[in-house]
Amino acid sequence: MKINGQSVSRETQERLEHFVALFKKWNATTNLVAPSTLGELWSRHVADSAQIFQMAPKPQVWVDLGSGGGFPGVITAIFLAELGDGWVNLVESNNKKAGFLRVALKETGARGTVHPIRIETAPQAIGPCDAISARALADLNSLLEYIHPWAKQNAKLHAYLNKGRDYETELQNARGRWQFDLLKHQSSVEASSVVLEISNLASKS
């Protein structure tokens, strides 16, 4: 099996397939993604999430903000299971979604913990991390606000943020408040989307 042109082991494929089956079952009663995108689960959500880990395919401690239905947090945690190292802290304040995430991690043997708390309290509760991910959560300014406490804890922190076609406007707005290094990765899934890799984040004020 290949995802975004990269080979995936049989073990990881089985974990991903189990996650997708579980996701469909839960989505019938808990709104994890828009029903209109359910038919494109592999291409629209799994592959889009997998590219995050594929950009930094090593064992490290992640924080996934607003994990929702597990994209990309659970997918990253599944890839880490194969490495047998690294961890994902999934932050999700919605109790129903947090319940799903717990079951998904347990049943797939993925490497992660669910934190059913608000993002604002998460840096103190979780502590330092190496990498942060967020997908379809908030505008860039707000995301950098969330990420900043972790950046102060670890100067080498990298954040990977999936963004759609309006990302240039968001970048322009964010540069008024923040300074950071930026790598733009073209999305493997959607031509008009990117993954913004942010490092050396600091507030200008």
Image (spheres, rainbow, N blue to C red):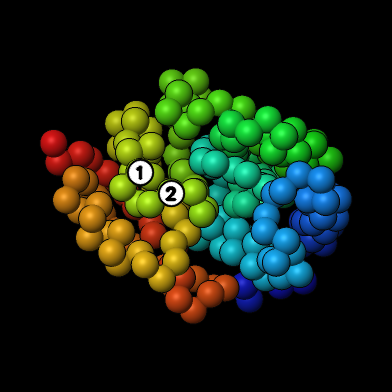
Q: Residue at x 72, y 48 (%)?
A: 31
Tag of residue 138: 2
Residue 9 pos. (x, y %): 76, 62
**Nearer to the camera, 4 or 195:** 195
Count residues near mark 1 (Cα–Cα under 10 Å), then give few for <14, some for 14-19, many for 20+.
few
Residue at (57, 73) in percent of width and height:
189
Q: Residue furthest bottom?
A: 191
Considering depth in this image, is 31 or 195 the residue closer to the camera?
31
| Residue 78 in picture, x, y percent from top left | 70, 48
- Give the quadrant of residue 34: bottom right
Q: Which residue is drawn at 81% across and 45% down?
A: 29
Mark 2 is on which residue type?
A: Ala
User: Does 85 sit left or right of 65 as displayed?
Assistant: right
Query: Mark 2: which secondary structure?
Result: loop
The image position of residue 33, as x and y in percent, is 68, 55
Quarter of the figure with residue 35: bottom right
Distance in Å between CA atoms under marks 1 and 2: 6 Å
User: Do residues under tags 1 and 2 come within 8 Å of each other at their CB atoms?
Assistant: yes
Q: Is residue 93 above or below residue 196?
A: above
- The answer to whether residue 194 is left or right of residue 69 is left
Residue found at the very far left of the displayed protein: 205
Task: Give me the residue at 70% from left, 66% from top.
Answer: 36
Q: Which amino acid type is marked by label 1?
A: Ser
Secondary-structure class at tag 1: helix
Q: Can residue 102 be seen in this view?
A: no
Q: Where is residue 76 in the image (x, y as percent from the top left)?
A: 62, 50
Judging by the rendered image, the residue that carries numbered circle 1 is 142
For the N terminus, give its image quadrant: bottom right
Whether residue 16 is visible here, answered yes or no, is: yes
109, 178: nearer the viewer: 178
